[in-house]
Image: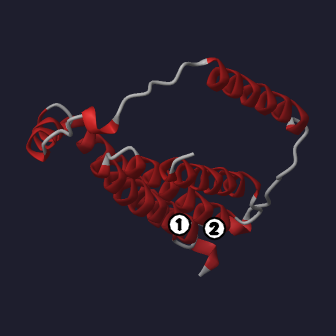
Amino acid sequence: MSATEIVFYCIAFFMIASGLGVVLARNIVHSALALILALGAVAGVYVILTVEFLALTQLVVYGAAVIMLVLFALMLTRARERPQALFGKNRPIAFVIAAGLLTAFIAGIVASEWATTNPDDIEPLPFQEIGDVLFSAWAVPFEVISVVLVIAMAGAILLSQPDQGEQ
């Protein structure tokens, strides 16, 4: 077993453990922090695959921006005032569906033939080409996402305002 495989298995362990932390945490802030760890582990996998640009994008866009938006939205809204039902009547059905999906994923991983490409044979894309594609073909989706994030933040601020009778 090579050093790269050992590092990959360590990162995979942290990714699975933090993913379970996201799902099983009772506090939503702890769940968001576990999600940051999971996204960081995904960035680690990108580094192993020698795709440093995607790793940096993963950390900046998801690890920082989206998680900060989620945390600010949680802090600005009155989510703690509402009762939370963590265990509903559909929990056994959800568990069966999740177990079925896990079985399907494991079966797909076991049945697939993994490519054995040498990483030295892959030519990295120059940053100029990546920038050209991002600001030409993907300019509109980036603008749409920015508008959606601004609307979400404005909604969180609006929800954080006290009602007329609460002052």
Q: Secondary structure at mark 1?
A: helix
Residue beneath the point at 20% across and 35% down: 123
Q: Are marks 2 and 1 in contact (CB under 8 Å)?
A: yes
User: Of marks 2 and 1, which one's residue comes earlier in the chain?
Assistant: 2
Q: Quadrant of the N terminus?
A: top right
Task: Say if 32 sits above or below 49 in the image.
Answer: below
The answer to which quarter of the image holds residue 102 is: top right
Kindly identify which residue carries mark 1: 71
Q: Residue at x 48, y 58 (%)?
A: 40
Label 2 crowding class (10 Å Cα cut-off): few <14, some 14-19, many 20+?
A: some
The amino acid sitting under disc 1 is: Leu
Question: Neighbour class for label 1 at 10 Å: few (<14), some, many (≥20)?
Answer: some
The structure residue drawn at horizontal position 84% and vertical position 35%, both measured from the top left corner, is: 95
**Quarter where residue 165 is shown:** bottom right
**Quarter of the image where one finds residue 132:** top left
The three-letter code of the residue at mark 2 reads: Val
Answer left or right for 42 relative to 13. left
Per the rendering, the mark at residue 29 is: 2
Report the residue at 53% width, 70% height from top.
Answer: 76
| Image quarter hosting the C terminus | bottom right
In the depicted structure, whether residue 6 falls above or below residue 76: above
